[in-house]
Image: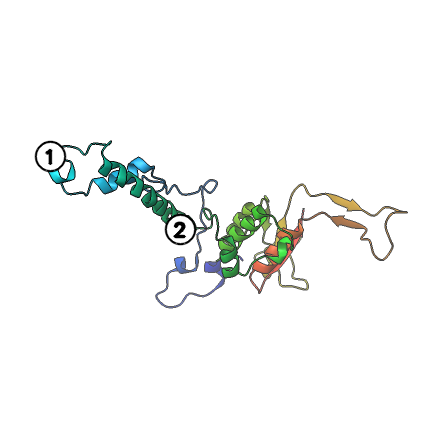
Amino acid sequence: MSDPALRWPRYLGEDEAAFFHFAPSGGPDEIPDQVDVLSDPDDETSGGFLMAVLPKGAAWGTPDNQALDPLSVLARFWRAIGSALGDAYRALFGVALESTAVTLVTSLDDWEIEYGLPDPCLGPDQTIDMRMRSLLLKIRSGGTITPGDFIKLAADAGYTIKIEEPEPFCMGGSDMGGDDELSGGDPVEYVWIVSVPNVPVYDFHMNEAEMGVTPFGDLGLPADLICLFKAMKPAWTTVIFSV
């Protein structure tokens, strides 16, 4: 997950920016404002749309291009028809709301089928809010590859984390006893460490814990975050969780 422009060779004529992935940045996500005059019109407004396109003249109750008398039979008739037109506009606006995951109301089941949900990382019994959160995480996890992407993904899941990428020890460049690390079982350049602050620590207690079963020390790391990261991490990397 280190800077790809420094790790991989570039092809002839290819700019190093081709390797960069810029994650969205900014404040909390806001639901886009899609409301307009047609999203929820009242009977008077929707009836007015119809009366505005009526022919003008005495036969239509508008001699000398006067405004239609609002108490006339014709005006009341078109207001009644306008009520059904308003219902149609509201239904069409509802379809527009279903087009984005942050505004959907009735199509959650269809979105879950499309994205292969429910997510096993969040367990089988999920409330509507949990299902919505799982859907948004699934959508936003697309293209997740840089440390910034994973930090943003964790924030969307409700966690504040830090990511450390150990530097491999390089002869002629690293100091003996310095911060750069020698490779162990996994090449250091493919290992990244996720630090989750403020998690509980469970110690081994005599007369309560079981030898060979209970760890001598265990961290209360969030299982849903671990599951999510292991599912989304680049396949060639190893992720380690710590505090």
Circle number at residue 105:
none
Residue at (56, 52) in percent of width and height:
134
The x, y position of residue 22, in whole percent, is: 44, 52
Q: CA distance from mark 2 to mark 1?
A: 41 Å
The x, y position of residue 78, in whole percent, is: 26, 41
Residue at (65, 63) in percent of width and height:
186
Q: Secondary structure at mark 2?
A: helix
In this view, the residue farthest toward the bottom is 12
Determine whether 39 is above or below 177 in the image.
Answer: above
The crowd level at tag 1 (other Cα within 10 Å; few <14, some 14-19, many 20+) is: few
State the residue in front, 94 or 242.
94
State the residue in front, 136 or 78.
78
Instruction: State which quarter of the image contains the N terminus.
Output: bottom right
Does residue 199 appear left or right of residue 212 in this picture? Answer: left
Task: Determine which residue is flagged by label 1.
Answer: 63
Res 190 visible: yes
The quadrant holding residue 171 is bottom right
The quadrant holding residue 116 is bottom right
- Amino acid, disc 1: Pro
Q: Secondary structure at mark 1?
A: helix
- Amino acid, disc 2: Val
